Amino acid sequence: MFKRLAVVAAVLVAALSTAPAASAVPRAAAAAVDDFSLAVVPAAVTAVAGYPARLTVRTATVSGAPQPVALRVTGLPAGVFATVTPTTVTSGASAVVTVQTSVSARAGTFTLVVEGVAATLRHQAPARLAVRTPTAVRAAFYYPWFPEAWRQGGLNPYTNYLPSRGAYTVDQAVVRDQVADMQYGGVTVGIASWFGQGTTTDRHWPAIMGGARGTGFAWAPYYEPEGRGRPTPDQIAADLHYLRSTYGGDRSSLAVLPGRGMVVFVYNAHDLDMADGCETINRWIRARTLLQQLWSESIYLNLKVFSGYRGCAGSATVDGWHQYAPASPESDFSRVPGGAYTVSPGFWKAGLAYGRSPFLARNLNRWRSGVARMTASGAFWQLVTTYNEWGEGTSIESSVGCRGAAPAGTLCDWSDAGRSDFITALHAAPLPGPAG
């Protein structure tokens, strides 16, 4: 028995002595993991509410092969939107993030998160956004009553000019182009005509709101029922609640000044004397109180000036004042609290002979000078009458000619290289603070 065990042991010893050493056994190489990194440059940016800021996202391949990386931005506060171009890159490439801020964005410093998602991995990088309150807001009056307004008074189109877009309809695609046009001119708020619930303008409001979605552009109503009658405080409050509840929200395009409320401009054109005007102020003060009591909603109220408006007891409670008189080249109410400076490109109402009063001939040099004075005025509201009121001939939207015969030297075509000369002049005169 012991003899057999000895033989087995000897065989094992011999086998072990001929086996290769453990260090000589090759190991299978570990498969490289496809990984990437991303960084945001600069790490911090500042934007004036209503204007954009831009960031660059840089990606790199850390290991393995380059791979597609989908990019997005999270952590956006109310009134702030972001687009990434392109939305997907191959690791090693870069993308641009355009952060669009609305006048509705509150001032403060916020941390945005840029996230990159690949097949099996995701990485994040922070960016700091500082939003500053604007010292001035450039806005333009806008009319969403097309196509209904193109044919009226026996004229088609009802304008002395030929819009570059033709007799367009109000749809989201058209509005998105118009919004980009206005933003190029530094316009951050459109003051859109609104005649009440169920009216033509009301039916077109979803398109104008949708056309501005995600752009940072904001819309304020131009409350027109006041120009046709004397709505009661209850009606006014109900109308404004309807607008706020229908179109409001953190991601909406409705203009809401932080801490002040939804912006409402009022076309109180019937206020021809102080007595009428003071009565209008009182009705709107009661409506504002009702709106707060019933729905806890607030408004930033901007009324049209009238003779003696400063002498009304309630005038001090009105947030802002403006003039709507496009037959005048400029209206300066910049020294009024919450006041406005308004410029007009011209006034030539459809169907009237050239030069027939009220009338304002178009002149680009005068326009540029007026825009310069408006920009330097210090007025909080810097207003353009108008973006697209074609019937009265006050539009700064591009035109390619006059509809009929016009005197020699008449400015009919202001569509230089596809961009309105009037918009280009606004672009060349940016407000202090925002980049041009």
Image (spheres, rainbow, N blue to C red):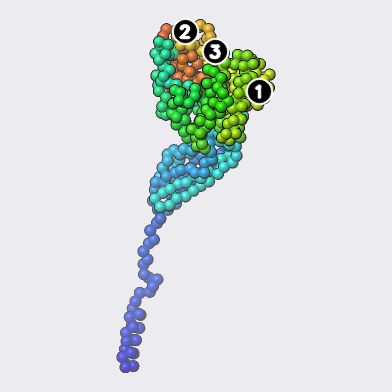
How far separated are the C-alphas under marks 3 and 1?
A: 26 Å
Who comes first in sequence, dot 3 or dot 1?
1
Instruction: Answer left or right for 302 relative to 125.
Output: right
- Provide the residue designation for mark 1: 315
Separation (CA) of disc 2 from disc 1: 37 Å
Under tag 2, what secondary structure? Answer: loop
| Total labels drawn | 3
| Quadrant occupied by the C terminus | top right
Q: Is residue 46 above or below residue 197?
A: below
Disc 2 to disc 1: CB gap under 8 Å: no
Of residues 199 and 201, the one drawn nearer to the viewer in this rendering? 199
Q: What residue type is disc 3 on?
A: Ala
Q: Which residue is mark 2?
A: 352
Residue visible at 42% across and 11% down in the picture: 153
Kindly identify the residue that appears in the image at 56 percent across and 35 percent down: 295
Percent x, y for residue 286? 61, 27
Residue contact between numbered discs 3 and 2, judged by CB atoms under 8 Å? no
Which residue, given by chain and number where applicable, does mark 3 sit on?
327
Q: Where 397 falls versus 60 (above or below)? A: above
Could you give the CA–CA distance between mark 3 and mark 2, rounded to whole angstroms? 14 Å
Residue displayed at 52% across by 37% down: 250
Q: Looking at the rendering, in which quadrant would you find the N terminus?
A: bottom left
Q: Nearer the viewer, mark 2 or mark 1?
A: 1
The image quadrant that residue 71 belongs to is top left
